[in-house]
Amino acid sequence: MFIQKPSRLIIPLLFILFGSWLLLRSAAPAPDSVSRQQAIQAFAPDGPGAFDGTPISVGQVALPVTVDLTNLPSGEYDPNNQLARWNRGEIDIFENEGIISRVEQLALRAESANLAPSAEVQIAQAGPGLFAPTVGVNFDSLDYTECCGGGGNVPPDPELAVGPDHVIAVVNTAFEIYNKTGTSLTGPITFATFMEANANCTGFFDPNALYDEATGRYILGIDADGIYYCVAVSQTSNPVGNWTIYAFQTGSTALFFDYPHVGVGQDAIYMGGNIFNSSTGQFVDSRVWAFDKTAMYSGTAASSVMKSLGSNNDTPQPLNLHGWNQGTWPTSGPHYIFTETNYDGANHTVWAWNNPFGANTLTAVGTIDLDAATGVTSAMPLDTPQLGGSTLQGNDWRPQDFEYRNGYAWSSSVIACNPGSGAVNCVRWAQIDLSTMTVADSGVYGSNGEYRSFADLAVNACDDMAIGYTKSSSSMYPAVFATGRLSSDAAGTLQAETQLKAGEINYISFESSAPRRWGDYTEMTIAPDGVTFWYLGEYSKNTGTANGRWGTYIASMTLGNCTPPTPTPTHTPTATATNTATATNTATATNTATATNTATATNTATATNTPTATNTATATNTPTNTATATSTATNTPISTSTATHTPTATSTATATPTNTAVSATITPTIDPVADADFLLYLPLVIR
């Protein structure tokens, strides 16, 4: 192409100028300022779908630090415990990181006190002859005097992780590990002692505890000064050993990170939290993170991805998967997250996060109106009375853990309701069908004059649900209770409640006035057997000090006569045929060719549906006739059976002419599992 001389001078000059501009720019992408991020969010429309598919932040890689639990002392004093920091004037425990101001909350509580009676509230019952959870092993756990190596912390915020052989209880800010009979194996160990090797892990509050059924790993996480989320993963299925600790930055000096909650996913450990302006205390937005669990379980540097859910959604609760041993653990699809929307207690949103380390799309896929589902209008929880006077903070109506079982997600919360003779705090629960994003069942449970708070639930393999909480009134000290329902029970109902541990004394703490903080959450979970529930609840305990009178209590329980399905794989083995022959022509004969297929598998699975995968080993022969040996491998996806296996499959294809094809080997390949012990739960049936 002909270009005149002036043009030939101008174009290179433009390239030179553009290159100079690039060189003068920063070599690394500069982080967005808080003001710029907030300005961008102001232009973004709030509501479902507002942040669909928009990556917000890829976090810095977190480096691993290894800690041997057997080398750590128990009960070591934490000089930065809450009581010490409060005495030094460094913190204000009366600060309320609420989505709205304290004045607005007080106005909502005033409205709650005047609620009209609701016929839709189920009246709680108890007594001989009524069905209630059957209590098994139960024992006292951490209390105020054990939380901080001689320091103090309120409230405890108890959570629990349960594996096949161990139980880990965590509180603000220590943990203890027990065997299944309640014998302490190690602890209490403060998080300050546990995580001191990581310099970013200090100033702890809001702990989390989880067990990953698919890999046999325990997970402990905790907020570190509102700037980092520190996560420890056990290196084996024995938590009394080596752990790997990571610190992921989740806040800053300008943005305070609060109220983390975690769920185990297929591909990641998911965590959600609320973000506040550090200077004003005002709510900014809610965010979710995905942490690379494959890297973390391998003890290598781990990456994270963060997404914002906007300022009209709060308290993200990532789905926590259960059902690996029963074969109902999902192996594909997005990870779901449940948020409160518009902070009205009624409206909630379900989000689907697809492939956070790849395409990274986050989409609102459902809206849930719990007022419409239950027939009970949401009202802000009231401060709770107790025997002996003074009150406990009722907190708010934010959702608690989001638990997966058999294609459904379950959630609980507490609202004020009027069972007939005045407003009290009531337990609300909901079962959500993830295939339709609709409420499959729900209810509100309460009784006159009694206040229930910080309810949390879990679900067994038979879709029976247990829920635990604190109960208190003007005639009883704060105590630990639980109730539940069978999957066959009438819609919207719970059974009778049972007391797990009675309160012992009027609750007070080093807080100077009521209402005193009682907690942010408790923990009900299910053992990997799919049958046994475990609850870590909170009660008022005579600790011997007026600085804090909280105690925690662990109880195992069962509901009904649940017999879980025997494990079936959710992984789909893929059989591949490798065949080498000396012939040149090919024909196909299905299951009738002169070939012998030998597959050996030890399998006790009973499949409920059997999709088939066809593997074809082809022998080519120089004569004009041809033969193909076709073997069919059948595999059952999510179903209700148990299998152990050692799959080997060898197919030898022999053509009828005088020449013989070289043997073809069909090699099944199955999805990898991080822990070899769990290969026992991946059956392959080859026919």
Image: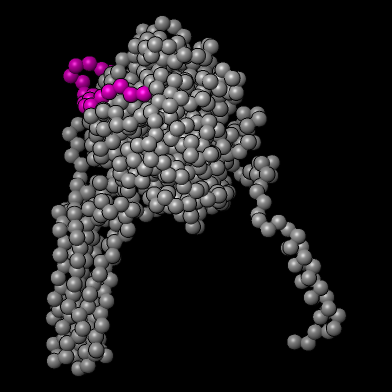
Residue most toward the bottom? 623
The one of 160 and 427 positioned closer to us in this rendering: 160
Residue 429: x and y, percent? 37, 30
Residue 462 in percent (x, y) is at: 24, 39
Q: Quarter-wise, where is residue 629 in the image? A: bottom left
Residue at the image position 76 percent from the left and 63 percent from the top = 21
Residue at horizontal 19 percent and vertical 47 percent from the top:
566
Report whether 251 appears left or right of 78.
Answer: right
Quadrant in which the C terminus appears: bottom left
Residue 384 appears anywhere in the view: no
Chain part drawn in magenta? 125-142
| Residue beneath the point at 14% across and 54% down | 604
Residue 164 in the image, given as x and y percentages of width and height = 25, 39
At x 29%, y 39%, the residue is 163
Q: Position of residue 578 (x, y in %)?
A: 27, 76
Quadrant housing residue 444: top left
- Seen in the image, is 194 located left or right of residue 3? left
Residue 72 lies in the magenta-colored region:
no
360 and 227: which one is in front?
227
